[in-house]
Image (spheres, helix red, strand yellow):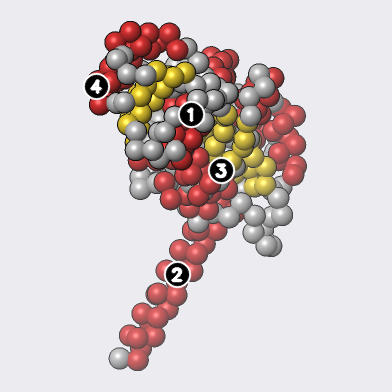
Amino acid sequence: MIGIDLELSSCVVLLAGDKSASETTAERLRAEGCELLLAQDAPQAMAYLEQAGLLVICDHDPQRFAPVLAAAKIPVLHATPAESTGSITLLGGGPGALDLMTLRGVRALAEAQVVFADRLGPSEHLALLAPQAKIVDAGKLPGHHKLTQRQIEAQMIQAARDGAKVVRLKGGDPFVFGRGFEEVAAATAANIPVHVIPGLSSCITVPGAAGIPVTARGVNTMFTVVSGHDPLGEDQLRQLTQLGGTIVILMGMGTIEATVAGLQRVGMSRDMPCAIVQSGTTEVQSTSHAPLWDLAAAARAHSNPAVIVIGEVAALPQTLLAQASGASAEAGALLEAAS
């Protein structure tokens, strides 16, 4: 195996080293028929030392195991560690409900060693989805960032350079207002392998969960997704109004009064149907319907995360309810007449 003719079958071998660095050596020792004791740090190796007949040190920093080497009264071999570069996976976690995450995303989390998690999406389920991973809270609230974007990128790159499989978990889809491409660019510049796993975006799934289609035959043929993080400019408001399609606003609760006033100012009907869907797809989902002129007032009953829908499609669920109510009333009148 390593240039020395040793009979290792049935030998108890203590393999000391970082898991990613020593994984290949572990596979080769198992193929030789060894019984392995694995230790990733010196205290763990010291605890196993008396049980082993051979000590193999395989680590990028073998000096970590100097106390073990000094205490060993068994043969010691040094193996070449594997390359330490890991990878980064950008994962869209979907709108919030656990069962709306993709199967590919679930597999990535199950294999992850470090997860940088946003506050949106299924982050509350990480103990189940990524039981072996170190979890780094990278969530951002308006005006309060635990880590800046550059700090997140630097820490992800360092973890990957240390050999870890890193997952960057974001709510929705990483390329829809998620700064995902910035992180792809940072990883690429650092020569770190990077992968993207798309997620279900809240711009479609959250209205859908409230019964609102973003497009509907005979009603509209387009929809526009807008970031409401900052107030929209006059030209943007005018162009949105002239398009005549559905407007879906993400991160828009803080600027909703300016949005409502601006859309009316550039000519949108004050009676345009609108809706707000809070915590869409989750067990605590709530929805309010209001005309444009009353939308800001309706928003006071909601908080983030919420999706704002402006357009004729916002009234469609209520139309169905009215039809169902009318059908029930008609059926009741027929039954009464028959009796």
Q: Position of residue 54 (x, y in %)?
A: 35, 24
**Dot 1 surroundings within 10 Å: few (below 14), some, or many (20 or more)?**
few
Q: Which mark is residue 324?
A: 2
Q: Position of residue 106 (x, y in %)?
A: 47, 44
- Mark 3 or 1, closer to the camera: 1
Looking at the picture, does residue 305 appear above or below residue 186? Answer: below
Q: Secondary structure at mark 1?
A: loop
Q: Position of residue 225 (x, y in %)?
A: 64, 40
Question: What amino acid type is highlighted by mark number 1?
Answer: Asp
In the image: residue 217, left or right of residue 260:
right
Pick the front one: 156 or 327? 156
**Dot 2 surroundings within 10 Å: few (below 14), some, or many (20 or more)?**
few
Q: Secondary structure at mark 2?
A: helix
**Who's the residue at 34% across and 33% down the image?**
11
- Mark 4 or 1, closer to the camera: 1
Looking at the picture, does residue 42 appear above or below residue 254? Answer: above
Considering only order in the chain, which callout, 3 or 4, is on the residue closer to the N terminus? 4
Marks 4 and 3, how far apart in space? Answer: 49 Å
User: Mark 4 highlights which residue?
Assistant: 50
Q: Which mark is residue 154?
A: none
User: Mark 1 highlights which residue?
Assistant: 5
